[in-house]
Amino acid sequence: VNFILLSILLSILFWLFESFFHVFVLSNGNLLQQIVSPGINEIWMRSLIIGLLILFGIFSQYYINSYKISEKKLKESEARYRTLIESINDGIIQVDNNEVIQFVNENFCEMVGYSREEILGKVAYEMPWLNDKDKQKVISMQKKCRLGIAEVYELALRKKTGDIVWALVSGSPIFDPDGKVIGSLSINTDITKRKEAEKALIESEEELSIIF
């Protein structure tokens, strides 16, 4: 809706209404006279109201245009953010203050073997890829995030297939423009190979200690 054109249309209708009102209700002159030359006082009164209507239309249109531009920029910014997140090799998961999962990227879905549809809207610490010990760890870390504290910790994620994937989790709070924590974002780096190498090294050292 173009509010400027709408205000002009309302102004025309108002002028015609006033003309009809003066002729048929107040019996003041004829219709053509009231439309073309209603009198100086009437012209001033009508012009004032019409001016206010047009100013309202201009202001409303400016507000609507500004809102549309801001909305477009926000959508473009969100699209760039999503593209950046999806291009990161690590798994990304975002939750709100109630631990409800708001977003996951494709890499995280691949890490745990679940689709976005199976993950979004669920409570993070209730998901099947966490064992009981790690559930308590996640709950504890999320409490710190709500206090604005970033944390780094390890989790043993059980994939849908049953395989274990070790993840190094970097959890950071998300703030709104007023500085209030509204959730958290976790970057999950697959460290399975490193953990397997560490385990192999420990086993090798134990075997050597037995021999010697």
Image (tube, grey):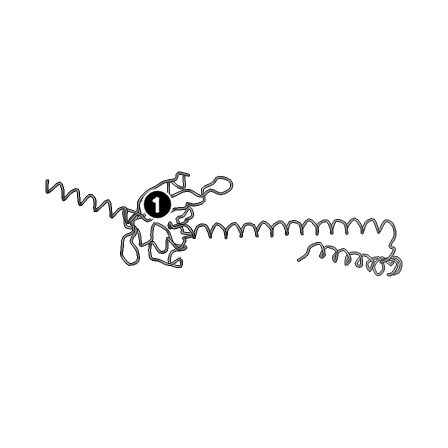
Q: In which quarter of the image is the C terminus?
A: top left
Tell me what residue is drawn at x 80 percent, y 59 percent: 16
Q: Give the residue at mark 1.
A: 169
Image location of residue 127, percent across then percent down: 33, 53
* Viewer-proximal residue among 175 and 9: 175
Q: Which residue is found at the position 64% from the left and 49% from the top?
A: 63
* Label 1 SS: strand
Residue 201 falls in image quadrant: top left
Q: Position of residue 91 (x, y in %)?
A: 37, 50
Task: Give the residue drawn at x 84%, y 61%.
Answer: 24
Left or right: where does residue 207 sit relative to residue 192? Answer: left
Residue positioned 66% across, 49% down in the render: 62
Q: Position of residue 202 (x, y in %)?
A: 19, 43
Which sits in the foreground, 115 or 106?
Answer: 106
The amino acid sitting under disc 1 is: Val
Residue sticking out furthest to the left: 211
Left or right, 181 with respect to 67, comes to: left
Q: Is residue 50 left or right of residue 191?
A: right
Q: Dividing the image into 4 quarters, which one contains the N terminus?
A: bottom right
Residue 161 on image: x %, y %: 28, 58
